[in-house]
Amino acid sequence: MPRIGILCDRDEEKKTIRYILELSAAREGIDCSVCGIDMEQGWRSGDLSCAVLSCGNRETAFGYARRLWRQEPSLLIVFVAHKAEDIFAALGMPFFHTVRYLELEQDLKAALRKLGRIRISAPGRVGFTGNGQTMLIPCREIFYLDSERHEIRLHLGEGVLLVKETLAQCEDKLRGRGFVRTDRSFLVNMYHIRCLERENLLLDNGERLYVSRRRYPEVKLAFENYIRHLDFI
């Protein structure tokens, strides 16, 4: 059963979000539980499937989002935008979904449906061969893969694994899961891209990776399509 947390700096708004979530879930036939998040009380992600984040100041909200992802990199976060410019600012963050406060009921309903589809339809793990065994790795835990001296390294939130496959083989098995080749040596999970620039990109773990001049238009298009596919706006 999905467990959704609400992080909001205004009590009345938090009550409104909780009411709409519970009402929409009941109408859509989605079995879920809703709870509050208090970052100042030593909160831990636990078994949350998703978090709804709403703050009066978007930079405060983005700061909370980074703290949540540091604790749980795969946590799905729904960002509540109060202004039009908040929506565009959120494009540089790996939010699961962005909703408009003025259309809160309609947009939260769409976010719940999306959460239900992903939990039902998206296989979350991919098998890789390494050290003489097959390892099942959750896609959201993969930041990127790189190739160096005929070795393929799988960069995860908590370490690096050596993979006995080619980068092309890895790219094939990750096709359609939000990965993009930024250079002949890098395959990057777009879920973790915080900011894309012409010659490099910033991941949400603070690493910067090279984007080749030749591949930049392809990477930019892929990232824009990824954002639209995830209903960020």
Image (spheres, rainbow, N blue to C red):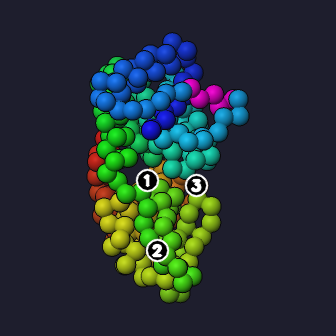
Instruction: List the single residue furthest toward the bottom.
Output: 150
Q: Earlier in the sequence, mark 1 or mark 3?
A: 1
Instruction: List the single residue furthest toward the top.
Output: 12
Classify residue 172 as left or right of residue 128.
left
Secondary structure beneath dot 3 equals loop
Q: Which residue is mark 3?
A: 205
Q: Which of the numbered marks, if any, corresponds to residue 128? A: 2
Q: Position of residue 136 (x, y in %)?
A: 48, 67
Compared to residue 137, the image places residue 153 above or below, namely: below
Q: Position of residue 111 (x, y in %)?
A: 35, 35
Q: Which residue is mark 1?
A: 191
The stretch of residues the image draws in magenta is 36-40
Secondary structure beneath dot 1 equals helix
Which residue does the image show at 43% across and 32% down from the upper left?
A: 32
* Amino acid type assigned to the residue bearing label 2 in the image: Phe
Classify residue 187 as left or right of residue 28.
right
Q: Position of residue 51 (x, y in %)?
A: 50, 35
Cβ atoms under marks 1 and 3 closer than 8 Å: no
